[in-house]
Amino acid sequence: MKALSTKGKQILLYFTMSVPVIVFAVYVFKHALNVPYMDDMELIDCINVLKKGTTNALTTLFRQQNDHRSTFPRLGIIVSYLLSGTLNFRLTVLLGYFNLMLLGYAFYLIYRSANKENTLFLPVPLLLFSPLVYHVHLWSLTAFQHTLSIAFSILSLYFLQPKKKASWFFAFPIAVAASLTNLDGISVMPVCIVWLLMQKRWKDGAVFFGLTAFYMAIYFTNFKLSSASHIDFSVTNLPVMAHAFIVITGSIAKFISDTHGIVLSTILGSGILVIFLSLKFFRRSQEGIKFSLEELLNFDLTDICFLRMLASMATIMIGRYAEGVGTMIAPRFQIYSVSIAIVFYLFMVKSAPFRKASFFKITSIGIALVVSIYSYKKYDRAVNFNDGGLKADTYNYTRNGIFLHQYYNLPEPEPAFFENYSFPEYFDNKIIDAWKSATALPGHGLEIQVTEYPELDRYKSFIYRINAIKILNVGGDVPRKDVYLGLSENSNPNCFYLVALKDDRPYRKNGELMAGEFNVEIPKKIKSGFYTARLCWLEAQKPRFELISNKVHL
């Protein structure tokens, strides 16, 4: 059999790298829903204001949203609106996938700046285009915020390389673009200035500094930090801040275990920082390993991009550490977790003494492949629960005026707010009436437990208390996804709520589900009283149910 030519090997390699991109695109296409989530309401308000024409369009695009000036997310929803003629969050999520592809290209530029052969780039698409970033890329706003912030930052630094001196001025507008995604984007500007000074490009550095100072004066005009940010610098807080910084640096380790996420992230984060400092600032020679002062000012594109990612970790830590170290491994920061791991890997490909060894290549690709495949299994239930919560809330809001899977810290918008958006209907009247009117004896020994949480620190920003609900003894014959808790008010049977349930049933060795429990936490928005509880799902689009109890107190 004739061996592949060099060109054939390259084509095969590029095809292999495209596989995770295509597979994850299908995954996003499957799960993207036309339902706003949390801060997506800002995008609805943007369209409302622009259609009314009462405010200057540039003012609307540039205005503050929480701690950010989210211009690009607003541009994303505008493009979606122009393409579909209505507010369409599913389309916006799908458009956001191109932002992930742009980030992948930015990582490729880093890789190619130090490598000619492409094989060791394969782990990057395997990690980046996977459910490791599901929460960010199934949410309209964050797909245009976090991902673009990192992508624009890398592209800005790309134009500041010594070999790009002729076109270095492109770096500033791209850095401005990064700042118009979220607040973290601003952190690339001081990194750009530092890198120019490291290169002894005094004139370019002075120009960039002057432009940055002028832009910052505009950016922070009438700027106020939101209640979500709790910045408190003090000596007593330094240990907590340092721990939070280490945790978010290694937060990709959370995928191994949610229970031990903080411990694993602390170990990995410490390892990443120690290895970077060791390989960067301690040179190997025949005389042994010695500290190199020269390396302090000798940063290439890979090094400076890693520094940029550390700046992101510091920005997030400063804004969120007061909420607790656990916040550092929150799903909304997934793209940062994956990105710093990728840039550290690219640093290892460039700097590790064993980088050319076959075992390094095989191990890197093997680990990335296992992690990528495992992430589809790991996050399957979380993604299904996310989908179910959005579907349930389209019913809850249109019928009862409340969301049960979001809006914990704010009151619901009035119906008039959604004048330019129509909630999709996932459950028609026939299905709801069948679930609502179903009566039977409780099945399979189902039980329900409702526990009201005390005022815990992780819920201190909520305006509602939280009810934890468990459905016990759920049989293995109940589907794995799109299963809901149906609640009918006993004093008013027409008052019916749907609550998405997270499947926590264990698996047998052969992959079959065993009997177990479903869980959910919901805010206490439902009127206090007694309810009839049913386990509800669809089978071949036909409503199915099992009665749990006809006397549940909420």
Image (tube, rainbow, N blue to C red):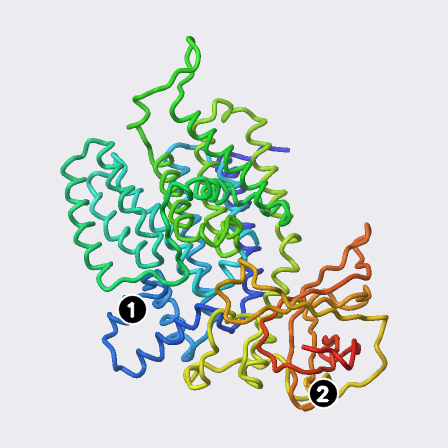
339 vs 551, left or right, is left
Q: CA distance from mark 2 to mark 1?
A: 47 Å
Q: Nearer the viewer, residue 365 or 546?
A: 546
The structure residue drawn at horizontal position 81% and vertical position 67%, both measured from the top left corner, is 477
At label 1, counting other C-alpha atoms closer than 10 Å, the crowd grade (few under 14, some 14-19, many 20 or more) is some
The structure residue drawn at horizontal position 16% and vertical position 35%, both measured from the top left corner, is 202
Q: Position of residue 373 (x, y in %)?
A: 63, 48
Identify residue type, mark 2: Asn
Identify residue type, mark 1: Leu
Q: Position of residue 428 (x, y in %)?
A: 64, 85
Does 431 sit above or below residue 504? Answer: below
Does 433 sit above or below residue 155? Answer: below
Secondary structure type for disc 2: loop
State the image quarter where residue 43 is shown. bottom left
Does 181 sit above or below residue 59? Answer: above
Q: Mark 2, mark 1: which one is toward the viewer? A: 2
544 vs 413, left or right, is right
Secondary structure type for disc 1: helix
Q: Earlier in the sequence, mark 2 or mark 1?
A: 1
Label 2 sits on residue: 490
Q: Nearer the viewer, residue 512 or 260?
A: 260
Q: Which mark is residue 61?
A: 1
Q: Position of residue 234 (x, y in %)?
A: 37, 44
Q: Position of residue 228 (x, y in %)?
A: 41, 61
The structure residue drawn at horizontal position 47% and vertical position 31%, both measured from the top left corner, is 349
At label 2, counting other C-alpha atoms closer than 10 Å, the crowd grade (few under 14, some 14-19, many 20 or more) is some
Q: Nearer the viewer, residue 117 or 387?
A: 387
The structure residue drawn at horizontal position 82% and vertical position 66%, both measured from the top left corner, is 475
